[in-house]
Image: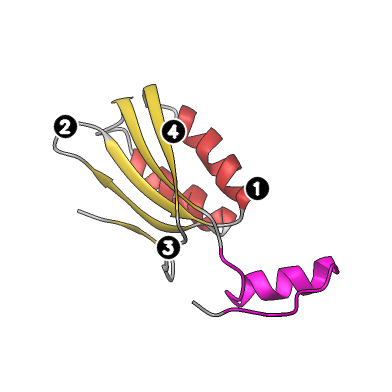
Amino acid sequence: MKTCHTVGRNNRQLLYFAKHKLLPMPAAHLIVKGKVQGVFYRASAKKMADSMGITGWVRNTDAGHVEILANGSAGNLKKFTEWCKQGPPKAAVANIAVTNKDEGDFDGFEIRR
């Protein structure tokens, strides 16, 4: 991980450092339960993550859930997690478990099989 020893209080500098991965970005591990397979949950999650600048992955589990590892700014992770609680129109999310994680290192957001 790249580090920066001097970070000013200027928001423009902070955005620059975050954009160039010089600051650690928080990550979250999500397990989404309910009617979440066969309803385009993974494809919709990828589309939402891409639009928010979230990196990581999403996959179906053998237990019938959806598992997500998401990495991004704290604000965007919160928005993404809120979206995951609803999911796409045909989904019926019953429960979501969120665990904070250390920074992930992803180039984009992918659907894993």
Residue that numbered label 1 is attached to: 75
Q: Nearer the N terminus, badge 1 or badge 3?
A: 1
- Going by the numbered disc 3, the residue's amino acid type is Gly
Q: CA distance from mark 4 to mark 3?
A: 25 Å
Label 1 vs label 4, nearer the camera: 1
Indicate left or right for 26 with 34 as reference: right
Residue that numbered label 4 is attached to: 88
Q: CA distance from mark 2 to mark 1?
A: 30 Å
Residue that numbered label 2 is attached to: 63
Q: CA distance from mark 1 to mark 4?
A: 21 Å
Determine if the magenta segment contains residue 16.
Answer: yes
| Magenta span of residues | 3-24
Label 3 vs label 2, nearer the camera: 3
- Going by the numbered disc 1, the residue's amino acid type is Gly
Question: Which residue of the protein is positioned furthest toward the left in this rendering?
Answer: 62
Q: Is residue 41 visible?
A: yes
Colour scheme: secondary structure
Q: Nearer the N terminus, badge 2 or badge 1?
A: 2
Residue that numbered label 3 is attached to: 104
Could you tell me which secondary element the residue under label 4 belongs to?
A: loop
| Marks 3 & 2, CB-CB < 8 Å contact | no
Q: Residue at x 31, y 30 (%)?
A: 36
